[in-house]
């Protein structure tokens, strides 16, 4: 209950504190104007290149902010996470750097390269279950309850949300005239942190969340209709999340102006466009 109260009272100050904490641990990525995409969109478009992080994703920000907040006893007991990809690599990489043991539980169907990369970054990988929910159940009973490890949740955690919010802080520092931020949504950690920071700095800014049409977890939760999440294979596996976070849903409800859903052909087209126009390889979740 105490944790819940703390979670819901996140402020711009928490995001600013996270920015100070993660400085030097992660890359301060460029936010660059794209002439061709601007012409195509009929607007001035800027892109935040989080794929320039060491593990190629913004997930490192939240991971570092959480890991550095642990007590000596928590560090000694180690951390655990459930993830099929980017979060796993972010946690493993920074836990190893900080001298903290990490155990990552991944669904059995996780691509071998992601398993291999996570192990290479120093994380112990346990393959369990068919879904992320199965992985989480195993983690909670075996690692948190029995071994006393600390869960570094991929999105439903105040420290993680504040860490991801630093993306928005940097964007507005670099390009103060931005009037709309378009952010992909999986579990909602990234958009929650960005929206919280951006609305506090610039109340009139518009925040638009984008979900995969097969996994519109935030939209389904706001509509009160879980059946809207159809699931299935997607090129945007990084945002293929069936259940939105509890904290993140409340923050989306409070701070996000619009939710949009994009289908597979549109995401594939976006990946191709970024490769051809920007010469940048973006994964489906980022291209959304």
Image (tube, grey):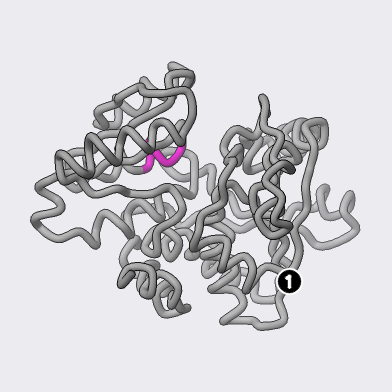
- Indicate the quadrant containing the C terminus: top left, top right, bottom left or bottom right: top right
Which of the 4 quarters of the picture holds residue 107?
A: top left
Location of the N terminus (image quadrant): bottom left
Q: Where is residue 233, by image quadrant?
A: top right
Q: Residue at x 32, y 68 (%)?
A: 3
Q: For the stretch drawn in magenta, what is the main secondary structure? A: helix
Residue located 35% across and 22% down the image? 127
Q: For mark 1, give the secondary structure.
A: strand
Q: Is residue 171 left or right of residue 136?
A: right
Q: Along the horizontal axis of the image, is 88 left or right of 184? A: left
| In this view, 225 is above or below 176 | above
Above/below status of 25 relative to 111: below
At which x and y percent is residue 183? 65, 56
Residue 178, x across and y down, in percent = 71, 71
Find residue 282 and report its horizontal and vertical position in percent.
63, 37
For image coordinates 69% across by 46% down, the residue present is 216
42 vs 278, left or right, is: right
- Find residue 213 and report its horizontal and vertical position in percent: 76, 40
The structure residue drawn at horizontal position 53% and vertical position 66%, both measured from the top left corner, is 170
Magenta segment range? 85-90
* Circle 1 Cα neighbour tier, 10 Å, few/some/many (<14 / 14–19 / ≥20): some
Left or right side of 171 for 108:
left
Picture layout, residue 76 above or below residue 132: below
For the image, the number of numbered tags is 1
**Is 35 a magenta residue?**
no
Residue on which the image places disc 1: 206
Q: Residue 160's quadrant in the figure?
A: bottom left
């Amino acid at each position: 209950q105490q944790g819940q109260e703390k979670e819901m009272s996140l402020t711009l100050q928490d995001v600013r504190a996270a920015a100070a904490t993660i400085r030097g641990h992660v890359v301060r990525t460029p936010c660059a104007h794209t002439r061709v995409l601007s012409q195509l969109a009929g607007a001035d478009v800027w892109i935040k290149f989080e794929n320039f992080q060491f593990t190629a994703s913004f997930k490192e920000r939240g991971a570092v902010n959480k890991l550095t907040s642990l007590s000596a006893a928590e560090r000694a007991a180690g951390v655990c996470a459930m993830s099929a990809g980017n979060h796993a690599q972010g946690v493993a990489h920074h836990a190893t750097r900080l001298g903290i043991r990490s155990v990552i539980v991944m669904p059995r169907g996780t691509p071998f390269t992601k398993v291999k990369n996570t192990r290479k970054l120093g994380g112990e990988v346990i393959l369990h279950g068919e879904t992320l929910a199965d992985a989480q159940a195993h983690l909670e009973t075996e690692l948190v309850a029995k071994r006393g490890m600390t869960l570094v949740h991929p999105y439903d955690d105040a420290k993680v949300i504040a860490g991801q919010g630093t993306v928005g802080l940097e964007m507005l520092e670099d390009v103060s005239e931005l009037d709309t931020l378009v952010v992909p949504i999986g579990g909602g950690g990234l958009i929650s942190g960005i929206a919280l920071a951006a609305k506090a700095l610039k109340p009139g800014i518009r925040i638009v969340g984008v979900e995969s049409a097969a996994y519109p977890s935030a939209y389904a939760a706001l509509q009160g209709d879980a059946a809207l999440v159809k699931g299935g294979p997607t090129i945007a596996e990084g945002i293929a999340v069936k259940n939105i976070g509890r904290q993140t849903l409340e923050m989306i409800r409070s701070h996000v102006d619009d939710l949009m859903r994009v289908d597979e052909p549109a995401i594939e087209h976006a990946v191709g466009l970024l490769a051809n126009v920007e010469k940048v390889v973006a994964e489906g979740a980022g291209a959304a």
